[in-house]
Amino acid sequence: MEHGQVRMRRPVMKGVEVEIIRSGQFFILLLGKHISISWDLGTRLLVHISSQYREHVCGLCGNYDGNVNNDLLSSNNQLEVDSTHFGNSWKVKPSCADATKLPPPCSGNIVRLVTVEQSCRVLTSAIFRDCNSLVSHKHTT
């Protein structure tokens, strides 16, 4: 999956069911009945894993044990605080460039920051009071 193209190498491993389908803006790679990968032809890649893999995976998608506090476990079993270090620890090819930390999207742009804060205030206002009682809120700074 690269540059808006999806190509499958042949032959696929024996005993593996692989199918590629197009659905809206996504290409979906179905790996049997329990794993699928959706790609938006750009930068978003979504991995869906069935519950039969609970506590049997590790890597960039976490360990699927129901505890989000330990999902940033690096390839050498060290709990990372920084997501960039975590991602770089799982590189398969050392020749690939390290990911770099991106600045927060509103840093250095006060107009964008004020716009975002005003927009978010609408969601927590009286208009949405009934909805807000149904969701837990996680505030970050």
Image (spheres, grey):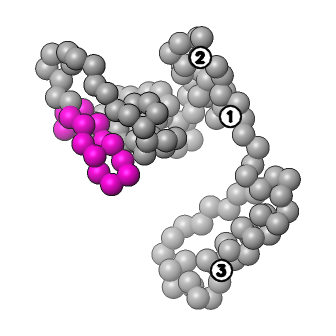
Judging by the rendered image, the residue that carries numbered circle 3 is 122
Query: Which secondary structure lies at badge 2?
Result: loop
As rendered, which of 25 and 131 lies closer to the eye? 25
Residue at 29%, 51% (x, y): give it.
23
As rendered, which of 7 and 83 lies closer to the eye? 7
Judging by the rendered image, the residue that carries numbered circle 1 is 81
Amino acid residing under circle 1: Val
Label 2 neighbourhood size at 10 Å, few (<14), some (14-19), many (20+)? few
The reply to whether the C-beta atoms of the residues labelled 3 and 1 are less than 8 Å apart is no
Query: Which secondary structure lies at badge 1?
Result: loop
Judging by the rendered image, the residue that carries numbered circle 2 is 96
Horizontal and vertical percent position of residue 42: 49, 41
Specify the segment rendered in magenta: 19-33
Whole-Å distance between the Cαs marked 3 and 2?
Answer: 43 Å
Whole-Å distance between the Cαs marked 3 and 1?
Answer: 32 Å
Horizontal and vertical percent position of residue 120: 67, 72
Amino acid residing under circle 3: Val
Taking the image as drawn, is residue 65 in sight? no
Question: Is the residue 90 above or below the residue 51 in the image?
Answer: above
Label 3 neighbourhood size at 10 Å, few (<14), some (14-19), many (20+)? few
The earlier-in-sequence mark between 3 and 1 is 1
Image side of residue 35 versus residue 2, left or right = left
Label 1 neighbourhood size at 10 Å, few (<14), some (14-19), many (20+)? few
